[in-house]
Image (cartoon, rainbow, N blue to C red):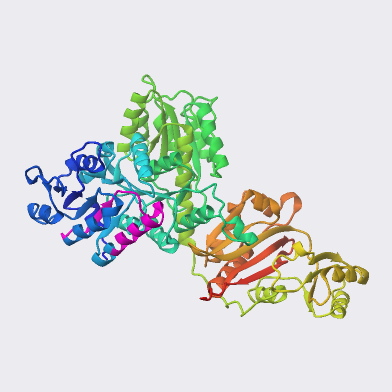
Amino acid sequence: MTTDLTPLFAPEGVVVIGASRQSGKLGAAMARSLAAFPGARALVNSRRPDPGAGVYASVAEAATYTDGRLDLAVLCVPATGSADALAEAAAAGCRAALVCAGGFGEAGPEGEAHADALRRVAGETGIRLLGPNTSGFFTPHLGLTASFVPAAGQLPAGDIAVVAASGGVNHALSFDLVAAGNGISLGVGIGAGLDVTAADVLEHLAEDGRTTAVALHLETVPDGPRLVEAVRRVAAVKPVVALVVGRSDVGDFARSHTGALATSWRTTRAALRQAGAVVVDDEREMVDALTALSRVQLPPHKEPGLAIVTAQAGPGLLLADRAGTDGVRMPELAEATQQTLAGLLPPLTYQRNPVDTGRPAETFARVLEATAADPDVDLLAVYALTEPDSVDLASAAQDAGLGADSPAVVVVGGLPEDVAEQRARLHKAGIPALTGPASAANAVRALVAHARQRAFGAAVSATTAAAPVPPGPLDENAAKSFLTELGIRTPVRVACDSRADAHYALRLLEGPVAVKVLDAAILHKTEIGGVHLGVRIPEELDAALDAIGSGRRYLVEAMAPPGVDLVLGVRRDPVFGPVVLAGLGGTAAEALADVAIRLAPLTAAEAASMPDDLAARALLDGWRGGPVLDRAEFGRVVSALAAALAASPDTAEIEINPLRLTADGLIALDAVIVPTAPPAQDR
């Protein structure tokens, strides 16, 4: 099967199978949408052929009238006839097909049989298949609208591509992007994705010179590693902005405590971000992000500095407030910059950052230029209203040299017709124009996230190999011994086969100890009364051993000093493979799902950034005199654990819970290593 999607998205000719003369039918709507296509066109209706009107009895007949230039077949027939129609198209020389109908895998066993038939034809003939169950795609610069939404034919050509799981979302995003002053290079609804997936389209777009930024909408992921690789490939040459559906789906990610926190939605977002995509929360943020990133990008930078110049204080405060919430750095302007501004602005205006100009005057362009030139400013955000007797915002921005070499986003307020005129001029100059403080804040966050990811990606070094997990099953003592081999600190402990051994261990360790049941089959010891803390004297030890029960093995270990408890786990995700999860320990982390996720293996530098994703990260930075997390040490621990799982195909999960942060560093207080389940035996 060819990997080239040119016959699909840039065909020489198109044939509609199932064309109808009834205006309400899908085939009729598709024929109308394709009427403007300048290449070869043909319609097939086996019941009512009319060659004089361009309607033929078969694809083979249509091909003879078009010199065999029919690359793309658009199937507007029911699911029951789709496989036969696809086979007919392939036999006539078509190299790609769009299947619009529903009634396949989503319709139960009978529909799945129709889907299997389509897969079989595609596999045997090599024809590429988009769909089924999609409203189609459009390539405006070619005049190609393979969509049954007529208005899609009016979308202007541009440089933003939309790759959406849903045909409806493809159209909705494209219309919103155009309303924001953008144009579309390609808009695709993947639908069921029986053959062509989002990863296929992304690989196509990586080589597409017309596209400068990509919108990616996902609902499910059939092949996680391939998607990640495709996103990584595109993000290396142009921005990818991703929106993932499923925030409220907590699913049955895993039975383990760690896995239960890592929902598929969170894992997918984390994987895309790690691959280089800018991940957004909703479609409005996506449009704002693409409006900016398709025109300007910041150089790689770990903490870009933002400056705000506002002609109205209130909107400027809204923008500054959002920037602070988003963690965007707003440096105070240099003394030299402030002196320059003082000579350009009234004395009562605020000039340290944000810069409040008051009602803009003829010096506005020089204010923008001076602020953007500040050595600690990497991005400028500008807000002003369209006031006929005041400054011309578009001209001022251009006079200040804003654009690709001096990145900025500009918010234009005013009447719709005035805003549209200013926005068009700004966009023509390569300056992204937004229509409100919230939209500008979305754009700023996207530009900063993109710069941070590029800086981080450039700094990442190669991962290191690790020793595989020893054959199991492994009890807690054996698991901790393996962690020690990885360089992860664990408490001093003694594995005991009898009560006498336990009493010896208490005397040996000289202090309060933890007494635990030692059994590889027991994963949750606390739930069965198998953990007793702060045991000091023989009588307390006997009580603990009695509670655990006779005939058991015991683990007696030194109590760790107080600190902040974390949970750290690595496991095999069914979609993305090995993943790492880290969060604050205890029930609060589970209830709030305050976790950081990465794909494994990963470098120590990548792992060291995980705590920054946590809402409760302040607890790791010396909160109220508490211990401070050494990010480098944390990175080494996580990277070692991830590498160990990657090197151990027979291990399903390794969990440290809790991993305690103390004044002396990190120490693993409990560890569980879970082997992969053996394959089910045939009966």
Magenta highlight range: 92-120
Is residue 669 or residue 463 the one in the foreground?
A: 669
Residue 373, position as x, y percentages in the image:
44, 41
Is residue 520 among the parts visible in the rendering? yes
Q: Relative to 354, say whether 679 is above or below.
A: below
Residue 308 placed where, x, y %? 49, 36
Most extreme residue toward the left is: 52
The image quadrant of residue 155 is: top left
Residue at x 58%, y 78% (from the top left corner)? 467
Identified at 21% across, 53% down, the residue is 73
| Of the pair 672 and 19, the residue shown nearer to us | 19
- Along the viewing direction, whichever of 173 and 169 lies nearer the viewer: 169
Is residue 294 found inside the magenta-colored segment of the image? no
Image position, residue 167 (x, y; %): 35, 45
Is residue 198 visible to the viewer in this orientation of the structure? no
Measured as percent of width and height from the top left, residue 503 is found at 88, 76
Count the marks: 0
Q: Is residue 497 left or right of residue 132?
A: right
Q: Left of 80 or right of it: where is 232?
A: right
Q: Quadrant of residue 138?
A: top left
Question: Left or right: 206 with respect to 31?
Answer: right
Task: Please tell me which residue is depicted at 46% across the width and 45% down the height of the picture.
Answer: 446
**Residue drawn 54% across the image and 41% down it:** 330
Quarter of the image with the N terminus is bottom left
Q: Is residue 102 magenta?
A: yes
